[in-house]
Structure formats: C-alpha cells, structure tokens
Image: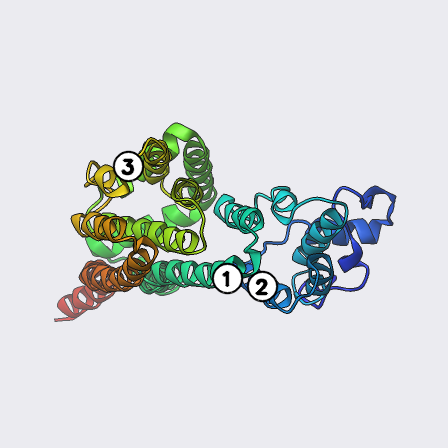
Amino acid sequence: MVDLMSRPSEKETSVVYGVYNSSAQSFSVRFQDFFIDRKKVGVEDKSYFFHLLAVMLDAGIPVTRALKVLSKKTDNPRFARIVNTIAYDVERGKLVSQSMTKFPDVFKESEVGVIRSGESIGNLGKLLFKLAEQTRKSHSLMMKVRGALIYPSTVLIALFISGAIVVQVVIPQIDQFFTQAKFEMPFMTQLVLNVGRFMVNFSWLLLALIVFASLLISFYISMESGRRRLDTFLLSAPFVNDVVRKVNVARFVQILSLLVESGVPIHEAIHIASGAMNNRLYQDFLVQLKYQVERGEKIADNLAKAPFLFPETVVAMISVGENSGQLANISQKLASHYEDEVEHSLENFTTLLEPLVIAVVGVAVGVLAIALLGPIFSLSSLVS
C-alpha cells in the first residue's frame, strides 16, 4: 500500500486537474490516484496555505510562483495537486478565486468570497493573513465543540464493552453451573443473559437496522427540508441551542470584522458571511439582511427583528459600531467575546452532561451487579 501521508512527489505536485489523464496511467498509478483524489484536506492545511501565500505575496513574489512553491510545501498529496492546479489556471489568466471554485469540497464559499474581495480591491495579501487567522480560530472553536462530546462518548463505549464481556464471558459460566446443578437462575441474571444472547444472535439484524437508520437520517438531512428542520431543532433543543447560537454568532462577527476592516462593502461582507454559516436559519436571514442593507437599512435594526438568532447584546454592539463608524473594531471585540462565551457554554454543557452520564453508568452497573451477585445470594440461601 502506498503511504499517502508522505511528502508529495514531483509527479504528484505536477498534476493539474482537468489536464491530467489518469486513464492513460498504469493500474498501480490509477490505484494510488483513486485514494489521493479522495483524501480530505484539513483546516490546518488551508490555514497554513493562506498564511504562507500571504507572506510570499507580501514579500513581492508573483502569485503563480508562490503557488508553485506552496504545492511542494504541503504534506497532503491531494492539496498539492489542487494548489498546482490553481497555479496552472492563474498562469493562464484566471483569478485565484475563480480556480478555487473548482474545489467546493475544499474551499468554502466564504473563503472564496474573501479571496475574490481581496483580488477586487487589490488587498489580497492583507486579507489572506486575516483569513488564515480566522480559519484557525474557527477550527479551534469547532474542536472545542467536538471535544465536549469526547468524555460521554468514551464512557458509554467503555460501558458497552464491559457489559459485553460480562454477558458473553462471566454470566454464561454461571448459567452453565446452575444448569448442571439443576438450580433455577435468578430473574435479573436470566434477563441479562437473554438480552445478551439476543444481541449476539441477532447482531446482524441490529447492525442492519443501525446502518439503515444512519443512511435514512443522512439522506433526510441532505434534503433541504430535512436540513432546515434539523437546524431549527438544534436552535430549540435545551442546552444545545445556546452553543449552536453562539457558534454561529461568533462566526458571523468574525467574518464581518475581517472583511469590513479590509475595505469590503458591508453588503458584500454580509453575503460572504452567509456562506460561512452552518445553520440554514442563519444563512436565510443573512441573505435577506444583505438586500435590506443594500436598500439603506441598518444592520442592527434588522438583527433586532430576529432575537431568536441574535441576542440583544449583539444588536446593541453592532448598533454602536454602525453609529460610530467602528463596525470592524466592534465586530472584532464581539468575536473575541463570543469565542469565550462558546467555551463557557461548552463547560456548562459538559457539567450538565456529567450527571446524566453518571446516572446511566450507575443504572447499568447496578443491573450488572445484581445479575452477578444474584446467583451468589441464591446459592448461599440454598446452602443454608
């Protein structure tokens, strides 16, 4: 198997998507290309790319030359090919943002929008620096959200494994002893044993049901109506809604600060921010907000109409920024504030989740303890 994590070879960094013909290659090369072309490009790869490109442009290096150099700097072979493709397109008269749109699974609409804005106002280097920092912060924020779920997931997986060992190894030995002694097993022990046997004997059915349910949910969420209902539910669910709201507000003010400070028109900044939202309700609202701002209305006045999405504090701060001409500065302060708020909400969420996890573990351990100790008590009573 080819090590796909190694530094890209000269051949890999010379591949241009749309020009390179993999069908003309040998089977081993096509086999390698299959995995390379499906390799995920991480946020760290993009943040590093944006930062180094900004440094090189700031040093006066032509964008085509900078891109060719950067294609050899990444450890991700697919990203190396993507960057080389962008360099190839730019060399033939295309803009960086135009070439980036060929890879929607790698570059978000908001990232392409920021690059496009930088190209149009001649401030690409400065915007790239800010984009690299904003990408890093967004990634850090999402890692904190995922990290909050690691503890309960780890505990429940450990509980499941422990229960499986008890049901498959320990209790059958007890059952065999009781069968040979012609004693009746205690009810709880027999119940746990029967449930365990059912899960083992029909594990294929349970697995099939889980796979079917996962595919059904994935298909439903992929539909616009399904995704919208899920996003609405997340904004209404207790404990979860606070985190979801603060993550989206933080992302909005981050991008607004980045673009307004760089001289991008406010309505264009709002349009780009709408593409960065991971919640359909926020996306729809920002699309409408863009049109309202183009008509001369203030951002804060429109945000006040959606208290479900934007807290009163955000509305008040944005209003101060608009009236004082310090919208970029105020948005930056709001972004820092809401990054801290997300972290605080995650701590509260974890704190509230811990008793629930402990209760589930306690019930499961209690049931297993009764199932194991029941036979011992039954034997002691029979002996006495």
**Figure check: 3 above or below 202:** below
Label 3 vs label 1: CA separation? 31 Å
The crowding category of the residue bearing disc 1, from other C-alpha atoms within 10 Å (few below 14, some 14 to 19, many at least 20), is many
Q: Amino acid at mark 1?
A: Ala
Quadrant where the C terminus is found in the figure: bottom left
Residue 175 seen in the current view: no
- Callout 1: helix, strand or loop? helix
- Residue of label 1: 132
Quadrant where the N terminus is found in the figure: bottom right
Q: Position of residue 189 (x, y in %)?
A: 25, 57
- Residue of label 2: 54
Say whether residue 182 is left or right of residue 33: left
The crowding category of the residue bearing disc 2, from other C-alpha atoms within 10 Å (few below 14, some 14 to 19, many at least 20), is many
Residue 249 seen in the current view: yes
Question: Who's the residue at 82% across and 53% down the image?
Answer: 28
Residue most extreme to the top: 225
> Which callout, 2 or 1, points at the residue further toward the start of the chain?
2
Label 2 vs label 1: CA separation? 9 Å
Q: Amino acid at mark 3?
A: Thr
Residue most extreme to the front: 324
Q: Nearer the viewer, mark 2 or mark 3?
A: 2
**Figure check: 330 above or below 296:** below
Residue 232 numbered mark, or none: 3
Question: Who's the residue at 42% across and 50% down the image?
Answer: 200
Say which of 273 and 1 sits in front.
273
**Figure check: 380 above or below 91:** below
Q: Position of residue 27 (x, y in %)?
A: 84, 49
